[in-house]
Amino acid sequence: MLVTFIILYLMLTVAVGFWAAHKVKGSGDFLLAGRSLPMVLSTSALFATWFGSETVFGASSRFLEGGLFAVIEDPFGAALCLLLFGTFFARKLYNMNLLTLGDYFKVRFGRRTEIVASTFMVPAYFGYTAGQLVALGLISNVVMGIPVWQGIVVSAVVVTLYTYVGGMWAISITDFIQSIIIVIGLIILAVIMLNKAGGLQVVMTQVPTETFQFFPKAESVSIVKWLAAWSVLGLGSLPSQDVFQRTMSSGSASVAVRSCFYAAFLYLSIAMLPLLISLCVKYLYPAEINGDTQLTLLNMVMHHTALPVQILFFGSLLSAIMSTTSSSMLAPAALFSENIVKPLTQHRFSDKQLLYTTRLSLLLFSTIATAMACMNSDIYELVGMSSILSLVSLFIPLTFGLYWKRATSAGALLSIVVGMGVWFYFEMFPVVIPSLVWGTLASLLAMVAGSLLLPNKVA
């Protein structure tokens, strides 16, 4: 029965994608839903940006192992990103009437920076998409008993199919439906688990005090690592195409800004539920936390709940992960076609040809992410790495380009290349301070030095 429900759910999702395809008249509709989403659709799309495998599987797994201190990156850093984007970036970028984030680098710093920045952005999505596909593979393994890699491949085909035909319209409509299922499913499961455990107070009395340690120790290294954890998604996802495309799909600048704030509140609130459920599991079924803790919630639901609860849980889980996966597939395809292929072909492609190129790129990047998912099963690691790449290379050029008039194309190019190079060096030869800190500082210094030394290169 559960397997039948999952198959029907996947078929329904694909059907929604094909229905949304009639709204796609050109690349603007495919990439940004015609910049026409109302508040409800815009908020649900932003809420679904990260509410996927890393929130339900990755964060709950890390929380069981290290408490709140281990999940600063997500969900807290993710909510911070939405607040910062709504406060400092959404209105400025929306009013520039851009199709992709790569267009911003072209307008502000020139064509060369556009191509370099887009080239650096595209690979960041491979790990992110792979993380979501791993989660879908794990679900298939637990529910259907098929090997994880087969579940990954089947899931990739389904998500790629409805994204291929419907683009951002399909993503936005399915996000709205899936967000409702996510919220209802997790709330009901949390209530059921708390009732089984005897109430919230009973569960909390069994939890060690250090589990809820949120702030770092009064040591410089500990504080730096804590701030670095906030920065991975909090700052690293600001220069990301998926956040950009979901925000820019809003019907107006005001809708874009407010939907960021609403989504941040909703995300942080609902993201606490998997953490609470994991505490209930640890209290009720301690044997379930042995082995791969990413499977804790899955195994608990399969072994200790009734069929209606299983349907609700796996429905909400599939909803969360599929909505995240679809946009992370579309983002690099949009950047590749609009900001790499288009300028390199000297804008000779028609809008119809660019749309075709975007769809072909979607198939290519989906294949790459699927291969990565089959080779690496650590969801939190895959997702975190993608945001770090954006942080050390693109965060500084994006921010300084918007708020520092003396920022130049030379400074932006140096910032991107030097930041990434320094980060890579410290990844190979690690020290106590995280490599992302060194990479971000190097990116900042390169931006300032390059802009001041080459002032005639102002865009």
Image (cartoon, grey):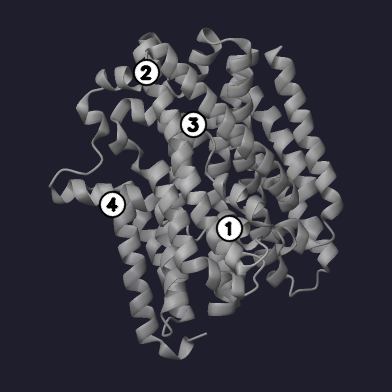
Task: Work out whether mark 4 precedes mark 1 in sequence or the reverse, and give the earlier one.
Answer: 4
Query: Quarter-wise, where is residue 98 in the image?
Result: bottom right
Task: Work out whether mark 1 precedes mark 2 in sequence or the reverse, and give the earlier one.
Answer: 2
Badge 3: residue crowd in 10 Å (few <14, some 14–19, many ≥20): many
Q: Which residue is mark 3?
A: 56
Circles 4, 3 touching at the beta carbon (< 8 Å): no
How far apart are the alpha carbons under marks 2 and 3? Answer: 22 Å
Q: Closer to us: mark 4 or mark 3?
A: 3
Compared with 314, 34 (above or below) is below
Amino acid beneath label 3: Val
- Residue visible at 29% across and 22% down? 204
Q: Which residue is mark 4?
A: 227
Circles 2, 4 touching at the beta carbon (< 8 Å): no
Is 207 in front, or is 233?
A: 207
Is 382 in front, or is 201?
A: 201
Q: Is there any visible trace of residue 429 in the rendered image?
A: yes
- Residue visible at 74% across and 22% down? 7
Q: Report the residue that reaches farthest toward the bottom.
A: 456
Q: Which residue is mark 1?
A: 241
Give the quarter of the figure containing the N terminus.
Answer: top right
How far apart are the alpha carbons under marks 4 and 3? Answer: 23 Å
The location of residue 338, given as percent across then percent down, is: 69, 65
In the structure shown, which secondary structural element does the residue marked by tag 2 occupy? Answer: loop
Amino acid beneath label 4: Leu
The location of residue 189, given as percent across then percent down, is: 52, 22
Amino acid beneath label 2: Gly
How far apart are the alpha carbons under marks 1 and 2? Answer: 42 Å
Compared with 184, 253 (above or below) is below
Q: Which residue is mark 2?
A: 199
- Residue visible at 66% across and 60% down? 249
Task: Work out whether mark 4 precedes mark 3 in sequence or the reverse, and give the earlier one.
Answer: 3
